[in-house]
Image: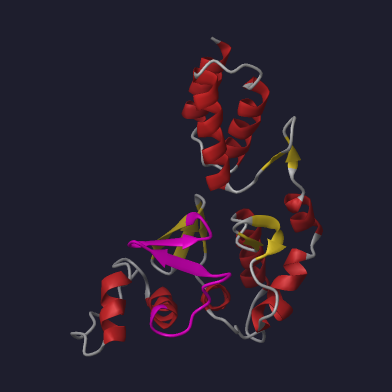
Amino acid sequence: MPQPEALPAPDDESQALELETLPINVGPIAHEYLNNYLTEKGDRTFGIKYKNGVYYFRNTRVEFDGNNLIIGGKEYEGAPGLWDLLTSVEPSLNDKTDDDFQNYVELMIATNAISNSENINRPAAFKDHKWKKIISPIWDSDEVKQKRKPKKKGQGFLPSDPNALCERLELLMASKQAGKTGLRNEIVSVCDELLRQKILPRDAYKNLILTLNK
């Protein structure tokens, strides 16, 4: 994949931001949309986010291979239509292919980018153009409704947010080490969900289960 031409020395704050934060291995399509996202008003509610030198889609790290995106271990074709959906506040609806929309819907659901970070049963936003034209139908789909249903965990519910799951697992393991009993089923449920979301490697999962069985 050919690399974009070298950029001239920055002459303003926006260009300096671009040079500092754009990955060096992106293709020309990714370069254009990421640059617009960084230097203009990009979608920071439902789109890609940039923090401490890393790009994320919700809490899932985004890597690049030319114009393509690698999210959650899967590579997505970086077509202009998908990039527009990911980065623009008001993406055009007239020039998108079925693959663009299908990949965008898959990413919104797989990463839970559609939901509020504190409450899976509330959308991240529900008043702007993008919500009304694009996000709302995804939110009302059967797949998202099923994903929003909390999973039972004995007393209470099992969260689906990976950060909340990791925090819960740490608390449960600390309680178990302190001598508290009756936690095994919940620990296994949390581990199962982290494994399903590909947050917990399979080897680490097996080691944790073995630890519980001792």
Residue 193: name its quadrant. Answer: top right
Q: Which residues are magenta?
A: 38-60
The percent coordinates of residue 92 (x first, y second) are: 62, 86
Residue found at x 37% / y 72%: 27
> In the image shown, does 193 or 178 lie closer to the viewer?
178
The percent coordinates of residue 73 (x first, y second) are: 50, 49
Does the magenta-highlighted stretch encompass residue 66? no
Left or right of 210: which side holds 147?
Answer: right
Does the magenta-highlighted stretch encompass residue 45? yes
Residue found at x 65% / y 44%: 159
Residue 142, compared with residue 34, is above or below; it is above
> In the image shown, does 49 or 122 lie closer to the viewer?
122
Residue 145, compared with residue 42, is above or below; it is above
Left or right of 32: which side holds 155?
Answer: right
Left or right of 173: which side holds 186?
Answer: right
Residue 168: name its quadrant. Answer: top right
Residue found at x 25% / y 89%: 12
> In the image shown, does 64 or 40 lie closer to the viewer?
40
The percent coordinates of residue 11 (x first, y second) are: 21, 90
Residue 34: name its quadrant. Answer: bottom left
Q: Is the image coloured rainbow, by chain, by secondary structure, or in one colour?
A: secondary structure
Q: Residue furthest bottom?
A: 11
Residue found at x 43% / y 85%: 40
Residue 131, compared with residue 182, is above or below; it is below
Q: Residue furthest top?
A: 214
> In the image shown, does 122 or 88 lie closer to the viewer?
122
Left or right of 119: which side holds 37?
Answer: left
Where, quadrant-wise, is the N terminus in this rendering? bottom left
The percent coordinates of residue 7 (x first, y second) are: 24, 82
